[in-house]
Amino acid sequence: MPAPDLDTIVSLSKRRGFIFPAAEIYGGFANTYDYGPLGVELKRNIREAWWRAMVRERDDVVGLDASLITHPSVWVASGHVATFNDPLVDCKKCQMRWRLDHIVEGQYGEVKRDAAGNVLCPNDNGELTEPRLFNLMFKTQVGTVADEGSVAYLPPETAQGIFINFENVVNSMRRKLPFGIAQTRVSFRNEITPGKFVFRTLEFEQMEMEYFCRPPKDRKNPVEYLALHRQWIDARLSWYRDVLGIDAARLRLRPHEKEELSHYSAGTTDIEYLFPWGWGELEGIAARTDFDLSAHAKQSGHPITYFDEETSEHLVPWVIEPAAGLTRTLAVCLIDAYSEEPDEKGDKRVVLRLRPNIAPIKVAVLPLSKNDALRPAARKVYDLIRPVWMTQYDETQSIGRRYRRQDEIGTPLCVTIDFQTVGEKGEPGDDAVTIRERDSQAQTRVPISGLLQALREKLPGC
Ligand code: ATP
């Protein structure tokens, strides 16, 4: 199915409790969103799937949760104070503000230029102002006196907290190279260009890992380092495909051109997704050499090295950094899972075909109708499942409409309790329920005594 348009996803997200525009009662607040009851579950499940793949299932990666308010020198060493800038231009005619790099990349369609070759406004071909550099970091103030010495920044990425804790982790966890440190956390960027839903927001969550390895034998031709970089690119791509179930045809790798790379970089490859508006970055896997650890050592005056017992020398490890956006990935999961199909009556059936491992609700318990005779058994089944999986109980409206509701939020399984379960007209019930599957709509009858086992088999990885 072609990608749904963004409005369809925005509207479903709000209607069904995934994502709400922030501060709506005050007229909204640009590029900020709140995650509703289902959004928060989906986000937790994606984060958990990442943590499982990056930390729990590996024996060479450990976790970290560094403070958000960071020593200002950290952002000097990392280069963010000096260079984390976007070139902004304003249209002299319609006053719209743009990022010049985005216009030039063709993000707003064909690039229009005047006779002298100057880029023109994508909205009305108006003349643009000279670009002004705008730092994306949010400033805050620590303490009661607002002066230069009290300035702190909210983190625009999670990586620096990892670098400045490198030595702590090596010493406390007795780590040997190669090993990684992983972190998931909120980041802040004062983005000024109009966002596309949660693709680009002021506050977003990232999932990052720094993988430290031995420096290559030949700095100019770091063959083994580049091979390791390749392994991480492949591992990360397969995570989107095989763990999140994202359509492989809508994923691609984009190695950065030489001109896009920083002077220290040995290469970066982005994993991109085909969004409704075109290809966009989901994750960057960067080969950052020893730049970050060396920069912090220089700025702090504190050498950051690793003692190699094999060679009895202190060395500065090289780093590979897979940096993913959690909230951007969440948008991809919604877009990619959305499908519409005709039902048996010719009406539209909307289904979110989310993998069970990330679906917010795994099982819905639905008595056939709102009836006192069904309720005790239905509540008993609900109490049985709830401690194991995220479960929803619903007895309002017709059963058909409730199935549709669950399809639309991606619930893989519904369990229905009917009069056969509880018995009718003096006849005993069979103590069995129906499991209805979201994708095939197939129904199977199982005894309540075997229900948990039957659900477990239908919910792999949950
Ligand atoms: P972009 O070019 O889209 O601004 P970037 O190259 O600046 O992204 P990185 O600094 O590499 O992004 O951050 C890693 C990941 O964090 C991105 O691939 C993306 O998934 C996510 N990310 C970055 N900025 C934002 C944002 N403003 N809102 C949501 N997610 C973001």
Image: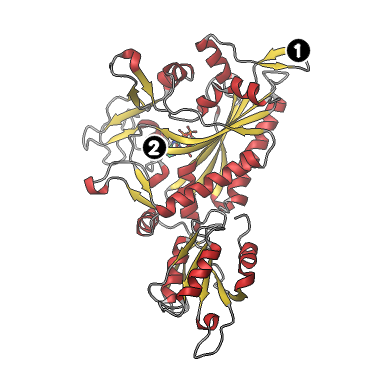
Q: Which residue is nearer to you in this view: 95 or 236?
A: 236
Q: Find residue 72 and report its horizontal and vertical position in percent.
A: 42, 18
Q: Give the residue at x 45% y 44%.
A: 327
Q: Residue 236 appears in which quarter of the rendering?
A: top right
Q: x, y (%) of residue 294?
A: 57, 15
Across and down, in percent, residue 17 comes to 38, 56
- Of the two numbered discs 1 and 2 on the same chain, state the one appearing first in sequence: 2
Report helix, strand or loop for mark 2: strand
- Would residue 199 be seen by someone viewing this image from the given angle? yes
Q: Horizontal and vertical percent for residue 9?
A: 40, 56
Is 304 left or right of 146, judged from the image as shown?
Answer: right
Residue, disc 1: 312
Against 338, residue 135 (above or below) is: above
Front residue (pair 162, 330): 162
Q: Residue at x 52, y 90 (%)?
A: 426
Q: Which mark is residue 227?
A: none
* Structural crowding at the residue carrying mark 1, measured as other residues with C-alpha within 10 Å and reported as few (<14), some (14–19) or many (≥20): few
Q: Which mark is residue 203?
A: 2
Q: Is mark 1 within 8 Å of ligand 1?
A: no
Q: Amino acid at mark 1?
A: Ser
